[in-house]
Amino acid sequence: MGSDLATDPIDTRTESNRQGIGSLELGLKVLDTIAQSAHPLSLKELSQHLDLSPSRLYKYLVSLMRTDYIVQDRSNRYSLAQASLTLGVAALRGIDPIQLTFQAVEALNNHQDVTTSVTIWNGQAPLVIKWLDASQPVAVNVRLGIELSPFFSVSGRIFLANLPEVRMREIVDGFYQSPPALPRHLGTPMQKEAFYRHLDEIRAQNFCSFHGDYLPDINVIGSAIHDINGNVSSVVSIMGLTGDVDVNPGSRYHQALLECTRQVTAQICGQR
């Protein structure tokens, strides 16, 4: 006796050759173009961007306005409206920044074969929440769950550089009242004003590197991942022997690290 339940055949076609709704895809492309623009776009500008005739394009704009995805201002330019905002907020709400960071760090560790870590700020100092060894581990006394120094680690300096001004100066000024040792950069000890200038550079460049400053023959470089508010969500660091891991600007490892943190920041902030 046959089954009363009908089952759909499995569709083994790829996404590119499945039949879709062309007009819907075009409408979404119109919406995407408006979303990516830094300013509201006119009908003429949209027509040029999308290579569509104004008469055909206008029909899509009308539908998008009716459904409250876009709005037309007094100068007849188009920008996103409430429905787009609701959609964006819902998408952002579903993003897990730490999980995205872990996935990216695992790929970085695998592709570059370099010791990699992730730290977050616990309110006082960086805390290691992810540690991945390379195929040839470096001999350092840092592992998962360890709290690092805000002054003698690359992640600590990155977090310090990005704290609110008042909080940052409170921590730095307190440290320099009786420092156990002066922080160094490129082998040079830094007095307080020099350290502040160093933090300014870190914030502007979004990376901090050590060239054997604290661990002989070991280089370290870190870069921040930011959230949608511009705050540091976490810091990704890589390290290795001086002869193996070049952390100078423009090096293979410097570029790979900054690309990793840039991509995760873009994902967290809903950018491309």
Image (spheres, rainbow, N blue to C red):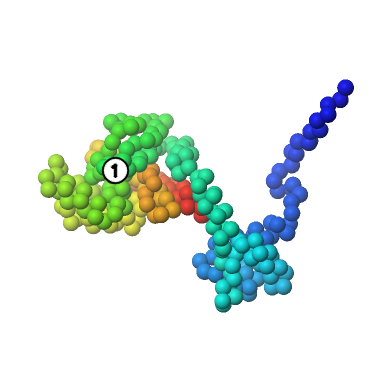
- Please tell me how crowded label 1 is: few (under 14), some (14-19), or many (20+) other residues with Cα within 10 Å: few
Question: The disc labelled 1 sits on which kind of residue?
Answer: Gly
Tell me: 99 left or right of 117.
right
Q: Please provide percent x and percent y for residue 168.
A: 25, 52
Q: Quadrant of the N terminus?
A: top right
Identified at 76% across, 49% down, the residue is: 19
Query: Of helix, strand and loop, which one carries label 1?
Result: loop
Please tell me whether residue 83 is drawn above or below residue 131 in the rendered image: below
Identified at 74% across, 54% down, the residue is: 21
| Mark 1 lies on residue | 123
Please tell me whether residue 58 is drawn above or below residue 137 in the rendered image: below
Q: Please provide percent x and percent y for residue 48.
A: 63, 71
Tell me: 116 left or right of 156.
right
Identified at 51% across, 49% down, the residue is: 92
Identified at 73% across, 59% down, the residue is: 23
Q: Please provide percent x and percent y for residue 120.
A: 35, 41
